[in-house]
Image (tube, rainbow, N blue to C red):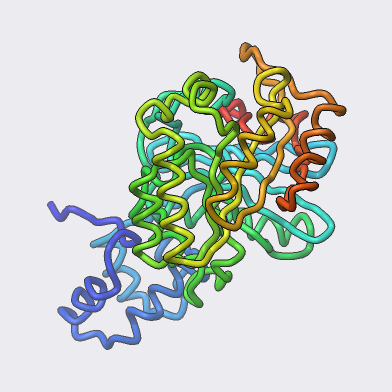
Amino acid sequence: MLEKKDIRNITQEELINFLKQYNLPNFRAKQVIEWLWKKRAVNFNEMTSLSLDIRELLDKNFYINPVSIHKAERSNDGTIKYSLKLSDNNLIEGVLIPSKKRLTACVSSQVGCSLSCVFCATGTLKLSRNLKYSEIYDQAFILNEEAKQNFGRPLSNIVFMGMGEPLLNYDNLLKSIDLICTETGLAMSPKRITVSTAGIAKIIKKLADDKIKFNLAISLHTANNEKRDSIMPINKSINLTELQDSIKYFYDKTGTRVTYEYILFNDVNDSIDDAKELMSFCKISPCKVNLIEYNTIESIPFTKSTNKKTADFMSFLNERNIIVNLRKSKGKDINAACGQLVNKLK
């Protein structure tokens, strides 16, 4: 019995060679690729510019495993959280975040996560598997279609800040971004894409060597090794000195300014001394800092910083010419805010 292949996980060259066996010209492969990605056909019958014979040939040899919307939930502030079902029935979550100037999709890179950051709901899940590049692309495509349907405009930005550590799924991450940025895909500029990492130093250097064009954000949350050890276990194997070295390497190679994400936890990392340590860390290269309000998560014993301490922290950095923004969390009422993705929409 013929074993079918996932047509979205073969290369364009493999598809051309397959069609050549049946004396079909190269432009047919281009048509198929456009149907698979730009139009995102979920079965071969949708490929109406191909003859019935070609569609039947494809269906006999290949299959398509699309991601689908399982459930959606809308926040009071307009944010929409999606539970997305994969072909193996695993669920991931993606979020559509509207604002006046932007319409941002937050996408996942893994089913679960292996890093176990103590303040993050996703960190309570075990890592099931990496997402394929086609599954990552599907999230972006689906959220783009949902953006047009719900807000009358396409996505302006994509952030890899959903479930999982993107740099631990490196090949699929880069393939998905390449596809999102091509005319065959969503034709989005890489400058509108941000990848967030907890700080995998050797892979940050690999990003630089691979001359990536998208933006890089570092989930820092404290510039004190002892504190970071306690809230982010990864710091025990990749400490702040090693992380700094990789960030400096990244900036020197790419000229791209990194963003530091810093969730303010009450009485943990929100003092002026903490701000001084962050300021010192920031000196290694041009950067900006996004301060983030902590979002309460059931059974996790952290609370958000007070308004006064947040303002004092911001003022300290501003006065020392560090670009700093306070990110107001959206979607908190539906557990769609930063750190809250844990597959509750089942």
Residue 12: x and y, percent? 29, 73
Between 163 and 301, the one lying in front of the other is 301
Residue 182: x and y, percent? 48, 74
Between 298 and 21, the one lying in front of the other is 298
Where's the C terminus, which quadrant? top right
Q: Does residue 280 sit above or below 294 in this rendering? A: below
Whether residue 45 is visible: no
Residue 42: x and y, percent? 46, 59
Residue 155: which quarter of the image? Answer: bottom right
Residue 178: x and y, percent? 44, 66
Whether residue 146 is visible: yes
Q: Does residue 172 sit above or below 303 in this rendering? A: below
Q: Residue furthest right?
A: 308
Q: Does residue 345 sit above or below 248 in this rendering? A: above
Q: Give the residue at x 44% y 58%.
A: 250
Q: How many marks?
A: 0
Specify whether 126 is left or right of 11.
Answer: right
Specify whether 315 is left or right of 345.
Answer: right
Between 74 and 265, the one lying in front of the other is 265
Q: Does residue 128 sit above or below 288 in this rendering? A: above
